[in-house]
Image (spheres, rainbow, N blue to C red):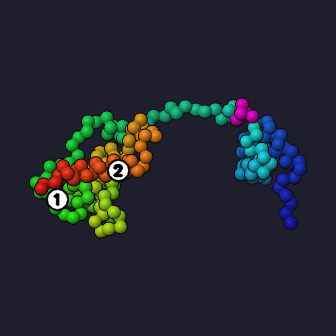
Amino acid sequence: MKPSTWSDDRITRLKELFAAGLSCSQIAAELGQVTRNAVIGKLHRLGMANSRPKQVREIEAPKRKRTAAPSRRQSAIRQVFAQAQEPILEESAEPHQSATDFDPGVPQDQRKGILDLRDGDCRWPIGDPTTPDFYFCSGRALAGLPYCAHHTRLAYQPTQNRRGRETQEQRSLRIQDHHRAQRAATSWS
């Protein structure tokens, strides 16, 4: 039978090191032959995991303000929203009459299946993936983003517009209304 890793002396030393403000990794290194996770587990079993005074916790890990520059993706998204809303529908000589016209803003020759997509194609899915009529937009995707400018506006929303104001269901309905309006704008009755 293997002897216990946690003898009374080691538990006493663990408590001393924890009270001194050492991190779990530092405690594991000091004790030797135990991992950081073993130290965390033992502290939980002893009921000491969150017993450290708040001042000690704040001194150990001061909160840093985010100073990093925005990523390329964030910059591209901001740039799309900064641009004026360009017309999304392209004028077409022929009306779309197929029953598979889920999004009349995507020309028939631009629609692709998953296996036909290439780098730089918009990956916005259109339709029900369980039907053979399902396709992707495949317009020219923005650099560093999976979508074209139009679908980037639908996929990404400025922070001030989405914080606690719109549920997932409301967003889904808004996008459906948008597509209905597109269909109505392009119907030639």
Is 134 magenta? The answer is no
What amino acid is labelled 2 in the image?
Answer: Leu
In this rendering, is residue 131 above or below 68?
A: below
Name the residue at the right extreme: 8
Neighbor class of circle 1 (other Cα within 10 Å; few <14, some 14-19, many 20+) is some
Mark 2 or 1, closer to the camera: 2
* Mark 2 and mark 1: Cα distance apart in space: 24 Å
Residue where numbered disc 2 is placed:
173
Residue 174 position in % (x across, y down): 33, 47
Residue 74 position in % (x across, y down): 40, 40
**Residue, x 28% and y 65% (percent of image)?**
133
What amino acid is labelled 1 in the image?
Answer: His
Residue 179 position in % (x across, y down): 27, 51
In this rendering, is residue 66 above or below 3?
A: above
Residue where numbered disc 1 is placed:
96
**Residue, x 85% and y 44% (percent of image)?**
13
The answer to which image quadrant residue 136 occupies is bottom left
Of callouts 2 and 1, the N-terminal one: 1
Magenta stretch bounds: 53-57
Neighbor class of circle 2 (other Cα within 10 Å; few <14, some 14-19, many 20+) is few
**Residue, x 74% and y 44% (percent of image)?**
49
